[in-house]
Image (cartoon, rainbow, N blue to C red):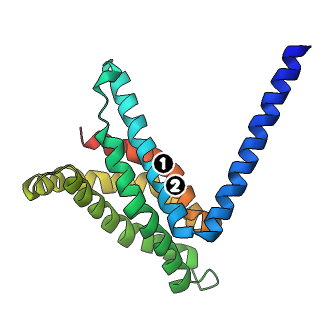
Amino acid sequence: MAPSVSKQRSEIGVGEFLRRALAQYLRLLQLYPVLTKAATSGFLSALGNFLAQMIENKRKKENSRDFDVSGPIRYAIYGFFFTGPLSHFFYLFMERWIPSDSPLAGVRRLLLDRLVFAPAFLFFFFFVMNLLERKDMTAFSAKMRQGFWPALQMNWKVWTPFQFININYVPVQFRVLFANLVALFWYAYLASLGK
């Protein structure tokens, strides 16, 4: 009987921890929306790169000692300084520019996101990562010629249904978080392009 009581306590402990963590996140989101979204984006971007490396090492059957610590650091920097803040302001801009009650709002928002924001954001991602990797403009040009169009096509395939849901059904304060959770897998894909 003692093990089940212990298990029950740990389940209650985990449940209570998650409830408190969510309450704290919501409080921070209300008090410091940009900073909270930036920190969340930085953490989840780094986690995405970390997972990409783990998957890549497992696929190649390499030892985990080959882990590139600078990868998650670059992704954390990009997520914190760019993804979180830019996404926050883009979603606010979209709400004001295309109100949800305007005709064809869902379609217009999706087109704005997919045809303007996605290509610009992807270009910016390649540019900033090139700088963080301390590569020159020749390397950037080569990366753009080689990887931009395939990455954009994959972005449209992967992100379009998620962004439709995000833009039209997720409350604006949670859109960056929703996108960051999808981005765990997306950054894993982008990281695989860099190798």
Q: Residue at x 81, y 23 (%)?
A: 7
Q: Residue at x 49, y 80 (%)?
A: 93
Residue 112 figure quarter: bottom left
Q: Is residue 83 found left or right of 179 in the rendered image?
A: left
Q: Tell me where residue 146 appears, x and y as whole percent.
A: 17, 50
Q: Is residue 91 above or below residue 190?
A: below
The residue carrying mark 1 is 44
**What is the quadrant of the C terminus in the image?**
top left
| Mark seen at residue 40 | 2
Q: Is residue 134 found left or right of 122 in the rendered image?
A: left
Label 1 Cα crowd, 10 Å radius (few <14 / some 14-19 / many 20+): many
Under mark 1, the amino acid is Leu
Q: Is residue 134 above or below residue 15?
A: below
Identify the secondary structure beneath mark 2. helix
Q: Residue at x 52, y 55 (%)?
A: 40
Q: Tell me where residue 193 appears, x and y as whole percent.
A: 27, 43
C-beta proximity under 8 Å, tags 2 and 1: yes
